[in-house]
Image (spheres, coloured by chain):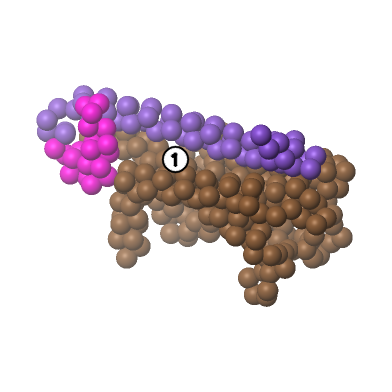
């Protein structure tokens, strides 16, 4: 196995830690934002579900609501 | 007119298909970019393999500066036009800008150790990047501390004042004696960096830009659903 890629002329620790730190931050930011999105969508689905039929018609008239209803359809 | 543009933009921004497309593009660019940056690109004659840190450090710095400038521009729009969508867009841009600023500072510090022999120096470029980090922090903090109408105003003023720092960061290497080298990539004149290093740098920049776009889209959806949730309460 070629270890040059890991050792990088003695700079491997610096290079790999910089790349690892970057990708770790990407992962954390993605996870946190994704969790927030799932939470808010679930809240939206619950509220939408609790509306009576007249209010559903009223809410569905808004195009943004329609898009969100489609994305949370499996939860409603 | 502004309303029509805003509504059409909003439709694209909340489309899950568009978000998936950005995610796929990000994965493609990141994979190719990492392969180029870590394997194909050559060593530097002076810095050897430590130069590879540039492929994460420089794009992060560029994107954090770009995002802050965008936030400031939108905040000006918030103050002048009172456009609520601008508020949501700038608020959704801030988290990725903040993280990219953090990555630029930390990877810069990691690069500094083998290059300059120190993790940190109060150099004009590094210090001005730290100031930008504090502005990002204050911007995000203002949304946590104040109620919405107050937070809109305070965060807008923070970004407008903070944007003064952006040209200072850009020209700090020209104005003051600094450990940083002058910029190697110039828009108006020829770049002093070889194409074998320029290609991975641009690929990584594209990947990072796509990632910030992805986070922005997700965060924008979060903020918009919060607004819509309040709207459902009022029906």
Instruction: Give the x, y percent position of residue B235.
Output: 22, 34
* Left or right relative to A40: residue A56: left
Magenta-span inclusion, residue A73: yes
* Left or right relative to B124: residue B186: left
Camera-nearest residue between A32 and A26: A26
**SS assignment at label 1:** helix
Provide the letter of the chain coloured purple.
A
* Left or right relative to B54: residue B9: left
Report the span colored magenta.
A57-76
The answer to whether residue B186 is above or below residue B150 is below
Q: Residue at x 87, y 43 (%)?
A: B117
Q: Residue furthest left?
A: A53
Instruction: Give the x, y percent position of residue B216.
Output: 46, 45
Residue position marked by numbered label 1 in the rendering: B219
Instruction: Give the x, y percent position of residue B61.
Output: 65, 51
Q: Residue furthest bottom?
A: B189
Which quarter of the image is occupied by the N terminus of chain B? bottom left
The quadrant where residue A14 appears: top right
Numbered disc 1: what chain?
A: B
Main SS, magenta residues: helix
Whether residue A67 is visible to the viewer of this picture, yes or no, is yes
Q: Residue at x 36, y 44 (%)?
A: B20
The quadrant where residue A4 appears: top right
Image colour assigned to chain B: brown
């Amino acid at each position: 196995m070629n270890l040059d890629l890991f050792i990088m002329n003695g700079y491997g620790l610096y290079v790999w830690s910089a790349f690892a730190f970057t990708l770790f931050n990407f992962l954390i930011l993605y996870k946190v934002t994704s969790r927030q999105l799932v939470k808010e969508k679930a809240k939206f689905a619950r509220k939408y579900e609790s509306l009576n039929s007249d209010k559903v018609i009223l809410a569905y008239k808004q195009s943004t609501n329609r898009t969100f209803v489609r994305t949370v359809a499996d939860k409603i | 007119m502004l309303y029509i543009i805003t509504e059409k933009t909003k439709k694209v921004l909340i489309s899950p298909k568009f978000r998936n497309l950005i995610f796929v593009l990000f994965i493609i660019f990141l994979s190719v970019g990492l392969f180029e940056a870590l394997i194909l690109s050559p060593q530097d004659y002076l810095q050897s393999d430590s130069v590879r840190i540039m492929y994460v450090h420089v794009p992060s710095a560029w994107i954090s500066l770009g995002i802050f400038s965008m936030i400031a521009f939108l905040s000006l729009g918030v103050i002048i036009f009172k456009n609520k969508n601008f508020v949501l867009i700038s608020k959704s841009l801030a988290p990725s800008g903040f993280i990219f600023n953090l990555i630029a500072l930390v990877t810069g510090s990691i690069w500094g150790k083998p290059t300059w022999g120190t993790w940190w120096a109060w150099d004009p470029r590094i210090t001005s990047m730290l100031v930008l980090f504090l502005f990002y922090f204050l911007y995000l903090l203002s949304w946590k501390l104040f109620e919405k109408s107050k937070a809109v105003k305070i965060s807008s003023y923070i970004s407008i004042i903070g944007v003064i720092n952006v040209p200072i960061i850009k020209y700090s290497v020209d104005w003051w004696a600094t450990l940083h080298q002058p910029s190697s990539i110039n828009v108006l004149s020829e770049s002093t960096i070889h194409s074998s290093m320029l290609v991975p740098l641009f690929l990584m920049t594209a990947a990072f830009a796509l990632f910030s776009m992805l986070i922005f889209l997700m965060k924008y959806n979060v903020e918009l659903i919060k607004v819509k949730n309040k709207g459902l309460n009022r029906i």
